Structure formats: C-alpha cells, structure tokens
Image: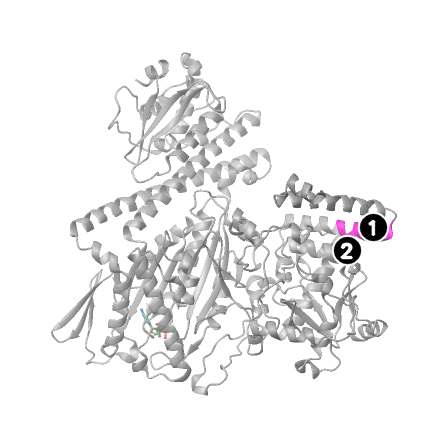
Amino acid sequence: MFMNAVDQTEPCILMANSKEEDAYFKLEWCDCDATGFRGWKAIFLRPLRGWVNNVSQFSSSLSRICLIQNFDWGKTMKNEPVMMPLRTELFRVCKSSIQKTTWSKMDEPEGVEPICCIIKDMQSSNLKGDLQVKSKKFEKMKHTDCEESNNSPCVSKIQEALASLNVQLKELSIQRRQALNDFLDLKGNIRVFCRVRPFLPDEICGYARRVLASDTTKLFLRIADNKNKQYSFDKVFHPQSTQEEVFSEIEPVIKSAMDGYNACIFAYGQTGTGKTYSMEGVPSNPGIVPRGIRAIFEQALESNYTFQFTFSMLEIYMGTLRDLLVPQSTKQRVHKACLSIQMNSLGGIEIENLVSIKVSNFEQVKRLYNLGSRSRSTASTKSNSKSSRSHCLTCISLTCSAAPERQKETNKIWMVDLGGSERLLKTQATGRRLEEGKAINLSLSALGDVISALQHKKNHVPYRNSKLTQVLRDSLGSDSKTLMFVHVSPKEEDLCETICSLGFATRVRSIHLESEKSPELQAKKEVEMDKLQQTITELESEQKDVQREIGRLNERLTLLMGFDQSNDVHAKGSLTVTEDLHFNGEVDLHNAKGFERTSPSLPRFMKPTICSKQKTGSVYLSSTGTRKKSSIPSKMKSMSTSYAIQGHGADDDTECSQGTSEYEIKQVIFPEQEKSPRSSTTSLHDGCFNDGSIQVKEINKIKRFTEDWLHLQTTGQTRTHNVGGKRIFAIPVDKRNIMCKQQNRVIYCNQAEIQNFSKKNSGSTKKTNLNGVDSLKSIVLDEARRFNVCSPTDVEDTQPDQKQDHDQVAAERTGGQVQEDLTVLTGTPGFRENSISVDSYSEDCSRPEQQDNKEESCMLFRTPRRSLFAIHSLQPDQHTDLKESMIHITSCHDEEQGTNGLFLKTIQRLWASVLLGLGIQSLGLGCDFFHGLLR
Ligand SMILES: Nc1ncnc2c1ncn2[C@@H]1O[C@H](COP(=O)(O)OP(=O)(O)OP(=O)(O)O)[C@@H](O)[C@H]1O
C-alpha cells in the first residue's frame, strides 16, 4: 500500500485517473537534490497516451510543486496529524483527476493505493488543518475559508490555489495542443478540398447537362457519354454546401494557429468558380477570411494569454508585390516602397516594407480588409465581370510572448485568394489580359510544384520559382497547416478547365491517394481521429472550467487586496487580449531584418550588426519590438481614384490601387478621431499628463508638429527625396503656415518669415550641423525612436532607378538658401547626418516638377508619417517614459542656459564613456583588444 511504501521510504507509484487514461506518477525519495531539497518528489512516470510528449517538462512542473512547498514528507509521514499537507500535495499534484466523477481502479499496480481513494478519503475525513475539501471540483479554491478576520492567510491560500490552477491550465493546454496536432497530423497537414459552384441564375437553362456528381470525398466527372472520371479529396463541398460547412474545416487550423503553427489557406480554381465567394463571401454570407478572423479574436479572448495581432494585405500582380494597405496613386507609383522578401535567421519569411497594422478586434480588420480589397487589381473578363487579376494575400500575424508551450512566439495565417487559372487559348485574351493570365498560370504551376514536392517529401522544394511561393515559404511545409480549396464550375462548357483544376488538385494531393489504398488503415485512422477529437473537446471544456475558476479567484483576490491581481505573475491566467486593446491602431511597418530595439544613445558602431544579431538569434526574436521602417509613400490621394496602366488600350485597363489614403487607414484605426485629424491633441491629455505642465506642452508641440506635417502630406503637399540612399519626406513651404525648427524649438512660421530667415543666411552652403541644431531635437527623436513614435526612415525602399535618380540630383546640388535652422529632423543612427546639406532640398525643389511653383522652397523632415499613429497609441507607461524624457529635455534647456551646464556635460561625458566601454565589451573585445591598441 501507498502508506507502507512511504513509510519504507521506497519509491511509490500512484495511479491518477484522468480521461479514462492511465497517468502514473512516481513519488521518489530524494536525499538531497541540486537545490538542496530533501524529501518526496512526485515524478511523472509515463506520458498519457498521445497527450504528453515532453515528459521532462511535465515532470519538472510536478517536481516544482514539491519544491515550492519545501515540505519534507519523509520526516512527517510517521506523524498522523501532519498527514494533511502530504494529502494536500497529492490533491494538488493530481488535481486534474479530482474533476472526474467516477474513479476506476483499473490497472492498479500492486501494493499501490490509487490516488482516487486518497482523494475520496480526504473528502470524507474531518481532518484538522486549514484546508476543507467539500466537493469534487475545485472546492478547495471555492471555499477557502476567508471568514478569518485576518485576510492574509486567505490571500496566500488563494494565491497558492491560483498558482496551482495555472500549472494545471498549462498542462491542459499542452495536452490539448498535442492532441490537436496529432489530430491534424492524422488528417494531413496539407489537405485538399473541392468546392463545386452552383449554377448562377443566368446559367440555368432547361437542357444544361450535369457533368459533375459528388459524395463526401469523391467527385465524379462525366467526360464523355460512357466515360466517367473519379477524383478523391479530403472533402467535397457540393453546390448546396454552406459557408458554415466550409468553415468547419478551417476551425481546427485556426485553433492550431492559436497554438503557434503557421497556416495557409488557398482558394484555387478557374476564373468565376467562386474563389472570392469562398474566401470573402458576401455581406449576408461571409466567407473564410471574415469567419476565420472572427474566430481568431474570439479564441484569443478565451485564451489565458495576451496576444498581439497585426494585419497586412498584399497582392501579387504579374510577379510584383503590392501592398494593398498603402495609399497609391498613379503619381506615387514612382516613389512607392519596394516590397522585398527576406528570410530571417530562423527561416521565417518577412516582407520588408510591408505595412502591417496592429489590430485588436474584428471590426478593425474588417474595415482594413474592405480597404485592401478595394485596391485589388480586377478587370472584366469573359468569365467574370469582376475578375481578380492577381493573387490576394491576407495575413494575420499572432504574437504571444508569454506562452512557452506555443510552437512559435510569432506565427501567421495566410489566407490567399489566388488569381483565376485559365486556358489562354480558350479565353482568347490579348494584351494585358494575356500577360496577366500567363503570370497567374505560371505562379499557380509553381505553387503546385511546391506542394507536390512537400507531399512527396522531396529534398528540394522549388520555392524560388515564383514570388507567391517565396512569400509563403515558411507557411508551407514542415509543421505548417495548409488547406487548398479547389473550385470547379458545374458547367459543361467549362469541362476542360475543370479537368485542369482537378488535375492540379490530384497533383498536390498525391500522397493521400496512396494512403487511401488500404481501407483498413483508413478505418483505423478514423477511429483514432474520433478519439482524439473527443479528447480535444474534453480538454477544452476542462480548460474553460479552470479559466473560469482562475477568473473567480482573481476577482476574489482583488477584493481582498484592494488592487488588481491580474498583474501578479500567479494571476497571469486571467489576462486576455483585451489588455492589449489599449495599444491598438499602430501602423506597424514591417522591418524584415528585425532590428532589435537598441538604445538610440549608443553610437552606431556599438550597435550589433545584422550578422551578430543573426548569430544571437535576436533578429527574429525581437521582431515584435523592432524599429520599423517607413514605407508609406508621401502623397495621399482621396479614395476611389482608379487608374489605368499606361501603354494599353482602354480595354486593357486593370483597375488597381484605388487610393487607400492614410487618412482612411487612420479612420479605420482611430474612428473617434476621424473628424479632425488636426485637432486630436487630447489623447495624450487623456493618458497621463493632464496637469498642464510644461512637459505636456512640449508633447503637444511635438504632436501638433506631426499632425500638421501629416496634414501637409494628406493634402499632397509633400514629396519624397532620396538622399544618401534614404527615403526622406520633404515639405514644400507654401502660403500656409508651416512649422519649422529653430533654435531648439519646434516653431510655426509663415512663408514671409522663412524667406526673411533664408535671406539672412543666404550665400552659405554650410552643411547641416547637427551638433548645433539642438539637443532637444535629438533627445525627442531618440525618445520618439525608442517608442517608435518616429519610425526610422532609413528605408532602402527606392528602386534602383530611383537611386540613380538621387545620385544625379545629389551631383547637381548647388548652393542653397534654406539653412540649417530650417532644418532636418535627425534620423536614425547611421544616416549621414553631418553630410546632409539642406541645399539639396532647395535644389531638389527646383527640379522640373517643382518649378511650376517658384515660390516654393523645401523643407526636409525625416519624420515618417506613422508618427501620429504611434503617438496616439502610446501606452500609459510609455506616456510616463515620454514624460521623463520631456523632463530630460527641460533639463537640457537649462543646461544650455543655466550654471549647471558644465556639471551636466561632465556627467554626460562620463556616461558616454561608460556606454563606450559597454559597447566595446558587447562587441566581444576583451583585454587583448586594448593591449593591441596600446601596442
Ligand atoms: N457557392 C456559391 N454560391 C452562390 N454563388 C456563388 C458561389 N460561388 C460563386 N458564386 C457566384 O459566382 C460568381 C463568381 O464568383 P467569384 O467572383 O467568387 O469567382 P472567382 O473564382 O473569384 O473569380 P475570379 O478568379 O475571376 O476572381 C459571383 O457572382 C459569386 O457570387
């Protein structure tokens, strides 16, 4: 018996009944382990079938429970009154078991008392002690005797219970994740479905011959009167299948994505077969994308972790990547940022310059999606009056840093509405339509090759053959989940296209066909899948129970302690995505290289290089807190402008990029501010600084500055310049008041003032002296950079021809008029600040397109447009930081004027020396380096 085993200080095996599965724990006597612990340790002995793979993780958490208690069981066993803590401990270790209403004694190892008996015993016995077990489910937590006059024992009990519940939740989550993954593995990580479109109202005619028939997994095609062909799929959706039915196949993949796996969902098929209908749906009947996104948010809310989501949308049009969330117009096409596909050190794909917007609820995504869809390239074809002429890729990226059991910290779901495959001979397309068709077919064929190679587990997977497969590289294959919906038309006249589509499907699904050859294997697989499905459902309901209990205890703790315990590490379980909602709406410009957030005060040479970051892996891991690059083109156009690609006849026009303006994006993210983008200076007041202090004024100045500047851009009065390989926004000085920086201040001045100023300083060709510009500026920018208020503008986003253009402009520079004080806001480290002559901008302004307005002079601001968004999205703690930085700014003002200047300068120098030393050390240069220098 158990007692005897303990008395004899022999290792003891306990049986815990959970889910009718056997879970064994070993209680091991430990004389002295590495931590100095002496006593009984509960060690997980055997994984639950198909649930727990990581035994060491599981056992370590159990061991930790013993260690937390630090209870020497060996010493106390002989003493009956102190049996209670031992039993409490067992109760805790096997807490998942106590939820069961029935306990079986099956497979009991001889001489071992099952844990269920101990727990039953505990329920009936009236033992002394502070724990009363009153019912089978969490009664310990529910009835913690808080009637005591002194709250602290009660608080500690709740905290203990919370800690224990959190451990339990984690275990359940691991088990559920594993079960789900096993389930999807059995189903197949690459699955192919077929959806048959119904006849459309104008296609229905009495003599239409049916060429398609289907059952749940097979599609029968009548290719001649006496010849049928059969195709197998994971599932076939017949014409009457609803969007809900289709989405039921997506749901497990969404769950898997919540567990940290990448996922990719495609809609493939001939033009006009319902790809967009499946992906997007219609307002009355939404498709996979809206349903999927809604499900993601719902699951995040239910989860006990905090998630961050970003949304991006792009299209691949004739082999070119286009950001659908970036405002574009005909003119801007020259300046628009180039999206380039990069791979980080961990093999993750990132698209440099792709705008990704932090989102926190379904409505935001919906509005962004609608904006993006409007910008898609569409055209009228013979088969579809609004045919998509590109592949449209929608991406939701999920980041959850506090969940080690997730597969990846950041993962993504791609939902892809592929361009319609078409037989060019049949469509008789010419001109641009022909080119578009060719490009689509080529990339679809490349996609087929990749999926087929993955299915056959080939050594070489030809990802590089198309932009589409390059973008999706990390979401196709390995442990990613891929679903392909092949759409077919029911029409007889589309038979050839249908055969082509089904041929594609067969190719990408080949491995499954092989496995289906054995019906026994298939039957076995199905039984196993049913079991796993049941397990998942049970685990999910258990998880919900535990989460509810955690929430309840947290509330109780809050009441007792008078503050929100959700910040407490033990109460972490109650945190949900809503926590993150305050920090929404930030336009997050992807930096594929994932620069980590380095201190802006470090000189550039001290900062880790990309290589060193890749070595340490920080490139990938810090991707969420990265410096962001700006890619938004400078001008914004009102929506609804469409343009034709030049050089083609009207018939060839492809509507694309219908001018999603930044203002529109802002409206999506900050609807409450949409009426007056210029007057929304109150949000910071609403945050922390509503005391009217000087710091607040400074913040408001900066905010006004960015807002005015944004306004200028919104009204199209800015242009971009390419200087030193950097993309820079320039603001022409016109008759309206503009802001400029002079003598350490952001000031507002009008045209006349600027001209006066320019005259005073005319003739000089001095370079911008940033040392003299002002400390305020650099500090503000440093701080801004730190919070991503001022996103770095060192975007290498110009096309090669633009770079050339710039070089030419730079060579033509002559003496300027606008001088250093009407100057440049400093940029990111590494920008050749001291070598930038403001002259270039005045010169630049005299280029042909600017000459129309002779009065115009130019100002250069390296502040990107996203500043405004980022300022709005500062979190309260960031406000505090900013406030501190403003205090710093104020002190710098004093420094220049006051008597403490020398002292402060000395401190600054000392600090710089320390940073220098640290930097050198971080570069890994030790004593040898210094000796080398001295030699
Ligand atoms: N399952 C369905 N039920 C009802 N209508 C459908 C269904 N599938 C497609 N349709 C209708 O068929 C028409 C064409 O569909 P859709 O635009 O989605 O095709 P597509 O494959 O995306 O075409 P393209 O490749 O040219 O963009 C639309 O009017 C759509 O509403």
| Whole-number angstrom distance, CA of label 1 to CA of label 2 | 10 Å
Q: Residue furthest top?
A: 78
Q: Position of residue 3 (x, y in %)?
A: 34, 16
- Most distant residue in the bottom direction: 649
CB within 8 Å, label 1 to label 2: yes
Q: Amino acid at mark 2?
A: Ser
- What x and y, as percent, mark residue 696? 74, 54
User: Residue 280: image x %, image y %?
Assistant: 40, 66
Up/down of 243 relative to 433, above or below: above
Q: Is mark 1 within 8 Å of ligand 1?
A: no
One can see residue 904 in this view = yes
Specify start and end residues of the magenta stretch as a single range. Answer: 888-898
What secondary structure do most residues of the magenta stretch adopt? helix
Give the residue pinned by disc 1: 895
Question: Mark on residue 37?
Answer: none
Q: Quadrant of the N terminus?
A: top left
The amino acid on which the numbered mark 1 sits, given as a three-letter code, is Glu
Q: Nearer the viewer, residue 803 or 320?
A: 803
Mark found first going from the N terminus, 1 or 2:
2
Residue behind mark 2: 775
Image quarter (top left, top right, bottom left or bottom right) of the C terminus: top right
Q: Residue 879 location, x and y as percent?
A: 67, 51
Q: Secondary structure at mark 2?
A: helix
Seen at 37% across and 77% down, the residue is: 437
Q: Quadrant of ligand 1?
A: bottom left
Q: Secondary structure at mark 1?
A: helix
Task: Look at 36% across and 52% down and name the residue there.
Answer: 478
Among the 4 quarters of the image, the one containing residue 703: bottom right
